[in-house]
Amino acid sequence: MEYKLTYNKYTEALKEGKFLGLKCNQCGAYTVPPKKVCMECSSEDMEVVELSGKGKLQTFTVLRVPPEGFEAPYIVAMVETKEGPWVTGNLVGVDPDKATMNLMGREVKVGAKAVPGDKFSGGDMMALTFSLVG
Amino acid sequence: MANLREVAVVGIGHTKFGNLDKTNIELFSEAAMDAINESNLKPKDIQALYFGNVLGTHEEGQLGMAAFAAADIGIPYIPTTRIEGICASATVAIREAFIWVASGFYDIVLAGGTEKATVMGTSYATRTFMMGSDSRYECPAGITFPGVFAMMTYLYSKKYGIPLDVLKDQMHAVPIKNHANGKLNPKAHLQSSIRDIMEKQKAKAKEKGKPVPTWNNEMDFLHDLSANMMVAEPLQLYDCCPFSDGAAALVIVPLEIAKKLTDKPVIIAGVGQCSAGPIHNQKDISRVISREFSAKQAYDMAGLTPQDIDVCELHDCFSIAEIVATEGLGFFDFGKGAEAVAKGETKIGGKIAINPSGGLKSKGHPIGATGASQAYEIAKQLRGECGPRQVEGAKVGMTDTLGGDLCTVANIIFKRGW
Ligand SMILES: [Zn+2]
């Protein structure tokens, strides 16, 4: 069966402000970032859906020593989406020098930003962004 | 499981680790020939090579390194296989060699690994190491290995209710212990204690006529952000292992043959290996599920439990990584590993000796070689050859090697075969 939500489709949607995922017709679980099969029950019977973009920040770090091509400081975070899956991205709109563990558990809204590619990345990339809500 | 033959390590080799002026192949050949010579064998006796190397393409522009490595020790016409399991590559290679010998397919196999990471420099090395993360769905955020373990640290602190400042002091006990051990290991990359490093920096300041820092002890030094810079909050420089060069290798044969070659064959009693997906799949990374599955396989195969392990070389790529590993391997309860290291329970002579070699932190972390280096140390420990860092009476030892964002873990349990 053809790959339902490819990286290209997923990132093209992010560029248009849509956060897509997959909903399993067998068990009802959501999968994002996309995979060939449902993360919970490994069924291929899934449909592409737009996700709420709501989530809770679970953990984070302030990167001070970046890899080539990135400029520090910046915040990397993991967010548990309202639909269940966790996603990794950048927390934006928060001063890295003021980031503390109090961020953990905060509600966030998922967005995305373009990241210039390098000679290894096979083109430009899209990173998820998280903005604090309330 | 199929009927497997008993398998043992008969010879081991290990280069100095550090910032070295030799090629990947030169390093591997030194370790390999030491292992073959110690086995009382000749290169032509080797039937296959399982070879760990991760970033040879970026370090030296070299693919197919396993074939060239075999040719360098005079056996170009054998099957060679490069194993890439990120930082766990060499343990995956040893497990592979074990399986082929245990199954009876081969009798005499060489396994090990080599890496030459320092040539890349920090910025490029950080980029190439990041290739071990999910390139589509995580790398665009600029995630790094220190970043992953930093996120693990916050999760650990919150989950177990250990205030961050308390946890960080417990974490500082990891480099203090591992550097103290590594000081006793002539092959270590950073062969000095944290106190040595601190005193050296004081002396340097004095020599240059600069104000001499007023650190009273290692904790003072480690608390000082100007001495111990922030890498990925809350991880600082001394929470992180270095980029290193080096190689290690072992010769693996059936026990029956081993007994003819050496008085002290080191039996491979159990092996385990498990993958995991990217960290977003793993979710709460304060526990490493791949390790829990891998270790269980190794314990079950060996018929042993965590209480039976006298000495363990485990994957302390970061201070928190050692703490979490001591829990995942079953040496301490979940949430108790940080307290255990702070209380000295993992020192040589403690409840269980963890990383007597100095670990990745002090001995160094040439990623393609690390698992073989851990196996080398355990073999030396079981043979009673470790001098001042000897764990007295060690009979059973274990290695634990972790690759990437916790996405590959492999474990091996060794015991005395005499
Ligand atoms: Zn499902």
Image (cartoon, rainbow, N blue to C red):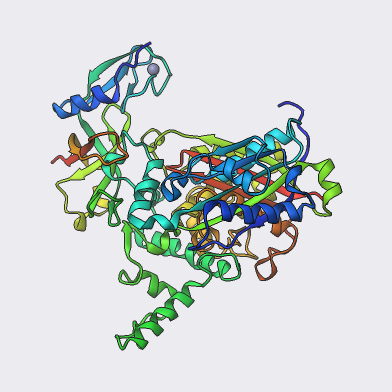
Q: Is residue B65 above or below residue B121?
A: above
Left or right relative to B152: residue A19: left
The x and y percentages for residue B155 are 37, 47
Report if residue B315 is visible in the image: no
Residue B312 quadrant:
bottom right
Q: Is residue B172 above or below residue B130?
A: below
Q: Camera-side residue: A3 or B108? A: B108
Asked whether, in this view, residue B55 is left or right of residue A18, the answer is right
x%, y% of residue A130? 20, 39
What residue sits 24% from the left and 49% below the top?
Answer: A70
Residue at 52 percent of width and 72 percent of height: B192
Horizontal and vertical percent position of residue B397: 68, 52
Seen in the picture, residue A36 relative to B307 is either above or below; the reply is above
Horizontal and vertical percent position of residue B417: 80, 49
Foreground residue, B130 or B352?
Answer: B130
Nearer to the camera, B182 or A125: A125
B322 with respect to B71 (left or right): left
User: Residue furthest toward the right?
Assistant: B260
B392 with respect to A76 (left or right): right
* Quadrant of the image containing the N terminus of chain B: top right
Q: Quadrant of ligand 1?
A: top left
Q: Quadrant of residue B209?
A: bottom left
Q: Residue at x 38, y 20 (%)?
A: A36
Q: Residue at x 77, y 28 (%)?
A: B3
Using the rendered image of the protein, determine whether residue A90 is visible from the camera's viewpoint: yes
